[in-house]
Structures are given as C-alpha cells and as structure tokens.
C-alpha cells in the first residue's frame, strides 16, 4: 500500500511536470541534451579508462546545470529534478515505479541517458517502464535477453587452482585477479554476455589499476551475480553422494552481497549417476536446500539461479540421464513451490540430457536437444522466464552445437540460454597462459565463444563460424 501511494504520488509529480513543462522550449532543450549525451557517450567509448573524468565533466556541464537552469520553466524544472531524484532513488532501492505512459518513457529515456554518462551501469534505465514491472523479474529477463547469456566465472579457489594448473600457472590472488580482469575488460563483451557470476573474492577485488571488478562489468551494462553456496560435501551415510552446504548465515551474506552490488545469485547442487545412485533421499535433500536458498535470495532482493547439476561423469546412457534429470527437476520444483519461491523471479540452471562422458554411444546434438527439451517440458513450469545451461565438461564447440539445436525447436515456453564456465573460458584460459602480453588474444578467444553462443541462442550458429 505504501509503495502504491508513493508510486501514485510520483506519478502525479511526473504528470504535473509534463503538463507544466510541455512547451516547445523544453522540448528543444531536451533535444539539445540528448545531442550532448550522444557526444559524451562517444567519448566514453574511446576513453573507457577515463570514465571518471567524463562523469566529472558531465556533472559540471550537463547535470541539470545549463539544461535545467532554464529561465521560463523554473517551476517545471524543479518538478523534473524531483522526478529525476525520485526515479533514481526508487530504481536504486529496487522499486521501479509504475508508469505506463509515454510520458514516463520520455522522461526515463532522458534519465537513462543522463545516468549513463555518469558511467554507472546500475543507473541504466533503458528498460521500458511498464505497468507493475518488478525489478527481480526485470533482472531475470535481462539475464536471458535474446542473443545473450551468462559467463560463469565463479570458480571457487580450489577449482580455479585446478584450471590454472592445466596451464602451469600458480593460483595466487594476483593471477586470479589479472585473469578475471582480462575477461571482464574484453571490449564488446556486453553484446553477447548479459551477466557474470563471480566468486566472493572477485566481488571484493580491484584490477591492477585500482578499478573495482564490479565496475568493469557495470560500465558495460553487464549484470554482476555471485555464487553463494559453500560447495559440496559428502552426504553422511550416502556413499558417493553429495550435499551442498552454505545455508548457515546465508541471509546475512545475501544482504551484504546486495549492498556490494550483486543483482543475482547462484547455488549449485550436484547429483551423481552411478550403480545405485542417485538415491531419492539425496535428490530431496539437495532440492530442499536449493529451495531454501532461492527463497532467501528473493527475500533479499536478489534473483536466484537454481542449479541442480546432474553430472556427466560415468558411462550411463542418455535415457538414464533423462530419468535422473526428470526426477531431480520434479523434486526441485515441488520444493520451490512448498517454499513459496516466485517462479517469475528466478532462473533454472540446468544440465543437458546427455550420455555419460565414458558411455560407448555418445549422443548427437539433435538427440541431446530433443531429449533435453522433452525432459524440461515435463518438469519446468512455463512461468520460469529462462533456462540457462551449464556446460558440465562438454567441449566448447559441443556445448554451442547443443544449445543451437535446442533453439531450433519450436514451441518452447522459456528462453533457452547459456551460463557456461569452461565452454566459454577454456580457449581464453589457454591463450592467456598467465602472461600479460596475451591478454588481447585471451579476450579475443572469449569474445569468439561468446559470439558463437549468442548465435546459438537464435539457432543460427554454424561450424563455419569457428
Ligand atoms: P561449467 O559450464 O564449466 O559446467 O560451469 C558452469 C557452472 O557455473 C557450474 O556451476
């Protein structure tokens, strides 16, 4: 109710401003301002490292200064400033106000432009402002925007150490920082990457030049997220099965991550296929933890990415993978329902239905696509905005081919996207090899895989792109 009254009050203010300000003088000033924004934007593109100075320039020159000091519209200008502040406040508090009209869009378009020149992507306001739009939903949808997917760069310290070992690089904090800073600074990454999942260490790091890693992403309009589980441990009395830990103190950690600037979270559960496993108990225990995590994440204002990964390890058939994945997803969505998780405000991170790595018969891309979509249709409600796949040890090209095949199937209710770790990073990691001299080729390798997967989101990838 309070939010509604605030929204109503804001609408009155905006509408009042529109009426008072609706003269041609103001329109001309707006056009002029948009021109200036264009210029500064161009400057920003060529001087990315100098965002600070652009922001300062803007503060001095354009931030309502010459624009809003307009003589005849003093009153209207005051309203505009009020609106601007209120919009930003509401946006930063995660409450995009309700506006349906072009007036709001007109205002927001300008505000978005203004905010952009400050160099803070979190101020970006491009989203069309629609009635009742909810910011968690908005984030979930932005993460699976057509042609875009997520870069999973959230390897825990032991996992990144393993990856570095494969290229003979020592896993020090500096190397981890330099490698990830190289990835996040790739020019044009935002064209195919909507969000990046970070590990706790990275979220708090700055690059060599002292720019926070988060800012490297935000400046490109890439949404930062955070892995919040504390990894898997053996499930007591259930040999070879794992349970994901991290629920203790999760509420406090989530609030801190939100304050640090994260917009979404990830929790990974692991289901192993073997002789007499998985047991239903293990799946249920993991599903319960996933749902508790997802509810806490939404409560904290963060979009949860719920990841029950059915591992590819083993020699099982694609049909065995189908039945395990089907049961897992059924139990996960049952728990999500019991925990009152809002489906529109989450994403599912799924493993593909695929034969085991050591299976004698390896599945074709069309079989993977057909079986995966069939399985998801039986288990995942259409209210979930998107499903992002993990690569799980598939080769980079295979992961792209499989995603491409899935996106060629009609009548699927969700966005089908990627949230790849290894399949996006492997060529970049190899090209980098720990040397600053190779940053350019590492970035090129990352951009290439990101572009291929972006094409796969439309079913338009072909081997000719490699
Ligand atoms: P892979 O794509 O390497 O499986 O990593 C994705 C991920 O985030 C697993 O949690």
Image (cartoon, rainbow, N blue to C red):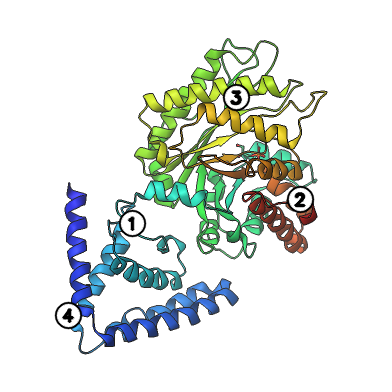
Dot 3: within a 10 Å radius of its alpha carbon, few (fewer than 14), some, or many (20 or more) residues? Answer: many
Q: Is label 4 or label 1 in front?
A: 1
Q: Which mark sits nearer the N-terminus, 1 or 3? A: 1
Residues at marks 4 and 2, CA–CA distance in whole angstroms = 58 Å
Depth check: give the residue in front, 120 or 112: 112
Residue 445 seen in the figure? yes
Depth check: give the residue in front, 131 or 126: 131
Q: Is label 3 or label 4 in front?
A: 3
- Mark 4 near mark 1, Cβ–Cβ under 8 Å? no
Residues at marks 3 and 4, CA–CA distance in whole angstroms = 62 Å
Q: Which mark sits nearer the N-terminus, 2 or 1? A: 1
Q: Which residue is mark 2?
A: 427
The x and y percentages for residue 392 are 68, 35
Q: Which mark sits nearer the N-terminus, 4 or 2? A: 4
Residues at marks 4 and 1, CA–CA distance in whole angstroms = 27 Å
Q: Residue at x 70, y 59 (%)?
A: 443
Q: Is label 2 or label 1 in front?
A: 1
Q: Is label 3 or label 2 in front?
A: 3
Lateral position of residue 364 relative to residue 329, left or right: right
Q: Which mark is residue 245?
A: none
Residues at marks 1 and 3, CA–CA distance in whole angstroms = 37 Å
State the SS at label 3: helix
Lateral position of residue 316 relative to residue 223, left or right: right
Q: Which residue is mark 3?
A: 325
Residue 153's place in the image compared with 10, above or below, is above
Q: Residue at x 79, y 42 (%)?
A: 166
Q: Which residue is mark 1?
A: 130
State the SS at label 2: helix
The x and y percentages for residue 148 are 58, 53
Which quadrant of the rendered structure holds the C terminus?
bottom right
Q: Which mark sits nearer the N-terminus, 3 or 4? A: 4
Q: Which residue is mark 4?
A: 75
């Amino acid at each position: 109710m309070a939010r509604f009254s605030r929204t109503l009050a804001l609408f009155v203010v905006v509408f009042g401003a529109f009426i008072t300000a609706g003269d041609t003088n103001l329109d001309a000033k707006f056009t002029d301002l948009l021109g200036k924004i264009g210029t500064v934007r161009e400057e920003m593109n060529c001087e990315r490292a100098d965002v600070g100075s652009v922001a300062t320039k803007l503060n001095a020159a354009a931030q309502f200064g010459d624009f809003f000091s307009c003589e005849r519209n003093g009153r209207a200008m005051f309203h505009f400033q009020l609106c601007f502040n209120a919009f930003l406040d509401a946006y930063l508090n995660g409450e995009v106000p309700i506006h349906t009209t072009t007036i709001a869009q007109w205002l927001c378009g300008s505000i978005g432009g203004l905010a952009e020149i400050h160099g803070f992507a979190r101020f970006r306001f491009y989203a069309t402002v629609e009635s009742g739009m909810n910011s968690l939903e908005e984030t979930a949808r932005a993460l699976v925007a057509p042609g875009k997917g997520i870069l999973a760069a959230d390897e825990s310290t032991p996992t990144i150490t393993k990856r570095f070992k494969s290229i003979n690089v020592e896993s020090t904090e500096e190397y981890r920082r330099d490698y990830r800073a190289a990835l996040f600074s790739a020019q044009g990454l935002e064209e195919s990457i909507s969000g990046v999942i970070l590990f706790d260490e990275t979220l708090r790091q700055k690059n060599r030049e002292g720019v926070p890693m988060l800012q490297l992403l935000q400046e490109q309009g890439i949404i930062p997220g955070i892995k919040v589980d504390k990894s898997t441990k053996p499930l007591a009395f259930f040999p070879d099965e794992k349970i994901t830990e991290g629920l203790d103190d999760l509420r406090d950690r989530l609030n801190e991550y939100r304050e640090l600037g994260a917009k979404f979270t990830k929790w990974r559960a692991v289901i192993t296929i073997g002789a007499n496993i998985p047991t239903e108990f293990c799946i249920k225990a993991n599903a319960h933890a996933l749902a508790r995590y997802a509810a806490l994440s939404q409560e904290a204002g963060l979009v949860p990415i719920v990841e029950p990964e059915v591992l590819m390890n083993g020699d099982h058939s694609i049909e065995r993978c189908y039945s395990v994945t089907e049961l897992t997803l059924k139990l996960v969505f049952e728990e999500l329902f019991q925990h009152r998780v809002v489906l529109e405000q989450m994403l599912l991170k799924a493993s593909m239905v695929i034969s085991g790595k050591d299976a004698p018969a390896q599945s074709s891309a069309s079989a993977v696509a057909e079986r995966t979509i069939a399985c998801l249709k039986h288990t995942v409600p259409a209210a979930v905005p998107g499903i992002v796949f993990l690569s799980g040890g598939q080769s980079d090209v295979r992961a792209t081919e499989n995603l491409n095949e899935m996106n060629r199937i009609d009548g699927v209710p969700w966005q089908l996207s990627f949230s790849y770790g290894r399949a996006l990073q492997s060529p970049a990691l190899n090209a980098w090899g720990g040397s600053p001299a190779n940053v350019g080729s590492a970035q090129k390798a990352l951009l290439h895989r990101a572009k291929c997967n972006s094409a796969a989101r439309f079913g338009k990838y072909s081997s000719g792109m490699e």
